[in-house]
Every structure is written in C-alpha cells, then in structure tokens.
Amino acid sequence: MTNRRTFLQQLGYRSALASSLRGLYAAEAADLKSLQAEIEKRHDESVQRLQQWIRQPSIAAENRGMTEGCELTMSFLRDAGFDQVTKVPSKGQPGIFATLDAGASRTIGLYFMYDVKQADPSEWSSPPWDAALVDKPGLGKVIMGRGAVNQKGPEATFLAALHAFRRSGRKLPVNLVLVAEGEEEIGSPHFPQIVHRAESLAALRKCTGVFMPMAAQGRDGSVTINLGAKGVVELELVSSSERWGRGPKQDLHSSNEARVDSPAWHLVEALATLVGPDGHTPAIEGFADKALPLASRDKELIRKAAQRQSEATVKQQLGVQHWVHDVGYLESLELLASKPTVNIEGLVAGYTGPGGKTILPHRAVAKIDMRLVPNMTAAGALAALKAHLAKYGFADIEVNMTGGYDPNTTPADSALIRAQEAVYRRDGYDPILWPRLAGSWPGYVFTGDPLQLPAGHFGLGHGNGAHAPDEYYVIESSNPKIKGMDGAAFSQVQYLYELAAGS
C-alpha cells in the first residue's frame, strides 16, 4: 500500500501537473485566439497570394509554365517560414523539399502539388487564369480559376495559417517536412524519386504522419474523412498502320475504306474487349483478381454515409439521372469505394474540326485511366492489360503508360485520423468516415515501404469543379455551415495543435 508521504508526493505531483496543463491550455487558447485574429487581419493578403498562384498556369501535361510554377511555389514556402526550400530534380518536372524546424517534439509531413489540369477558356464563365472573385448563389464569394480547389486553394489556405504564426511571432507546435511535385495531374510518374532521395527519407522518417491540405466540406457543409484512396494507371492506347501492318500509311480519302483496313475501327474493337457486354464491368483477365472486397466495417461506414446524404442532391451536382445498372444509392456508394474501373477519358482519330473531311485515318488514340483498389498494383494492372490485348489479337496496339501508382489505406485509429476527427467535432461537425476516396493521390509513397506512415487529407472549406470548367473555392462564405478561407485556415491551425498533442 502507498504510505502517507508517497501519497502526498504523488498528490503534489498531480496538482503541479494539473496546474501546468491548465497553464498550457490557457496559453494555447490565447495563441488560438490571437492566431485567428491574425488570419482575419491578413485576409486580403491571403486571397491575393492565391490569385497570384492561380494566374501562373502550371500544366504538366502541356509542359506549360512549370519552371515558373515551381519557382513561385518555392517563394511562397520561403515567405511562409520554411527555413530550407530546395528544388529537387527528377526525370520529369522538378519536385520541392522543404523543412520548418520549430524546435517542437513532434514532426508532421506535408504533401503539396503545384501542377494543375488543362483548361479550355471557351468552356468557362470566367477565364480560368483570371482568378476572379465571383458571387455564387448559396455559397458567397468564391475564387474561380484552374487550380482553385485542386489544389492551390487549400494549399494557399495552409500557407495563410503559417503566415499567422510567423506574423504574430508564435512558434508552430510541430515541425514540418514538405515534399511537393509538379506531376500529380499526369499520374505522378517521378514522385518516388523526390520522396526516396536520402535527405527526404531521413526527414520523413521523423514524421508521425503526412497530410495534404484539402477542402473537405460538401456544398451542404458536411465533412468527410477519407481513410485511403484508389490507385490509378493513366495510359494511351495507340492503333497505327505502322505497328499493325495494315491500313494506310497516311490519311486517305474515305472511299478507300471499301478496300483498306481502318486503324480507328481496330482500336474500337480492342476497346470493346476491355469491358463486358454492359459496357462497364472490367473484362481484362487478371486485372482485378486480387482486388479486396469491402470489409464489413467499410460497408457499415458507407451505410451510415448514405443515410446522411441526399441522393437527389448528389445526382444534381454530378449532372446524372441514373446510376449504372439502375442500382440504388447505397449500392452506388459501395461501387464508388470498391470497384476497380477501366475508363475512356478521350478518343482521337482523324479529323475533328468543323464539318466533315471524309478521310480514313491512319492512326487512332484512346486515353485510358484505370482505378485500383487495395491488393491491386499499377504494375500488375498494366501487365494484365498488355497480356489481354495480346491474347485477343491486338498485340500491335501500343500501350504507353504516362503515370500511375498503387492505392493507399490509413487506419481509422491512427493519430493522424483521430486528430482530424477531434478538430472537426470540436468545431461542431460530425465527420463522415469514408473507406476510400474514389479519386487518387500518390499517398502510397508514404503509406507503403519504406516509410509506412499514416497519410490523408485535412481541412474545412468548400470548392468544386476539379478538372472541370468553372472550378471554384469559397473565399467568403454566406452559408453558416461552410467555412470561408479564413475559417479553413484556422482549422489548419487547430489541426497542428491537435497533432502536437498526439491525440
């Protein structure tokens, strides 16, 4: 049994600890209040920084503005307080490695991307590179432009949080290690080169997890926590007379289709073998043999999510009237999280301008993406596709993989995810836990070997239109359920403190 002296000593220690913790919490509360005020004070500065970022096109697919985009991102990181910012060469576009040493006991990893998708100005209501502030009914003032929500808006919001620390003279509660790339929108073909260099790995091994800033709120204000993401393979299938040995060496008058083979039809026939008779279910032999089905816990998370969402609203936002095979909403969500896919992004052959040209094209190209679920790999999917084409008589069709990577998963009980949930709940949100983002990001480089770190996305705020016309990000919200840029930046401040506490 504990004697009286030991008991009193323990009581004194506990009292001192409690007093110390009260002081810590009071100091943290004071920090939070002043940091929130600093964010609001510098609102215009933060918006102007995002506008400058959007106005610099950085399109890897077109090799447009990439050098300038990388340099601008590096300058933003330096201005935000990173003490080491280094351009990292790769076999493609350069990456960025940066560190911020706050003298803290915990270190957190960050993933940034500085590239964006292509944009056709004729499809936009506001020019994609103007970064105009637009009033959007039901949402408030938004910034419209390519990269607004994917990903420059959320990243600029995180930088706004760092500026609040720096300008107020307060130290971050965690150290930061950042790795960034300029090829996410083409499948991150060289990102492993940036992460797996010795200096990057050594720094990332000190991290308790890695996250990517994100606008995680839906238009209804709901918040989603993703516990992983599908992998992806992006590629081109090319049918040409040169490789096939049939068809014209150059475009011919279409009357010759009566006696000359068509590389375009050859490609169409090959594409038809990739899916079943429903035009949807992958039919590539060996493609999804190892795909893991949804676990019972995943199905339960999806069931709960379905109960909290409006199917009609989701269909309206997507612009669709039916789910595939006319399945119900719950099954559509299960498919979204669990189904491997083979998708045609685009088809290009012959003349595509105004009117007709009556030619027989000598070459046809299909742009394809394949989404992967756990236990599938990008390398395995590519090999299965090549073997399938060869088996069905299409070995001549070129398969040019442009990028891709494996799926990733992070446990719901990891400190990274628990911290997200704690911040959201403290702010009055009941987050939806979602098994797997149907889109993709290269989190596998963090969750897989050799790092094996938890990885995910975090951030309040809302935007939409990624990869589409009129992409936007909410700056000043008129919806009390949705955070504007300042509120989203403050959520990042709260998240850093929660990560420091080690929830």
Image (cartoon, grey):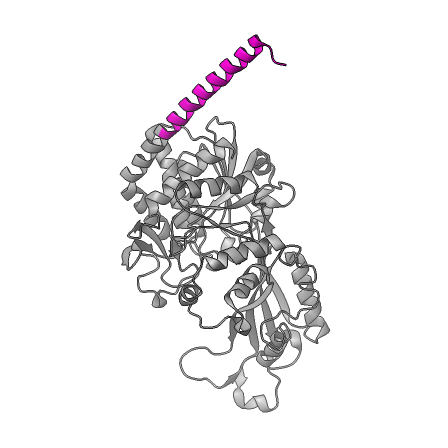
Above or below for 319 versus 465: below
Q: Quadrant of the N terminus?
A: top right
- Tell me the chief SS of the magenta region: helix
Name the foreground residue: 80 vs 173.
Answer: 173
Left or right: 419 as drawn, with respect to 240: left
Query: Which quarter of the picture shows residue 31?
Result: top left
How far across and how far down the image is residue 15, in percent?
A: 47, 17
Q: Residue at x 71, y 71 (%)?
A: 390
- Vertical side of 77 occupied by 323: above or below: below
Q: Return the residue nearer the eye: 346 or 276.
A: 276
Q: Is residue 31 visible?
A: yes
Query: Whole-percent x and y of residue 497?
Result: 44, 33
- How far across and down, in percent of the image, does residue 348 sit? 51, 73
Could you tell me which residue is drawn at 36 percent across and 36 percent down? Answer: 163
Q: What residue is drawn where x is 46% and y is 28%?
A: 102
Residue 11 falls within the magenta-colored stretch: yes
Q: Is residue 232 magenta?
A: no
Front residue of 461/183: it is 461
Where 19 falls versus 76 (above or below)? above
Image x and y of residue 323, in percent: 50, 70
Q: Residue furthest top?
A: 5
Q: Can the viewer see residue 406 in this picture?
A: no
Residues rendered magenta in the picture: 1-29
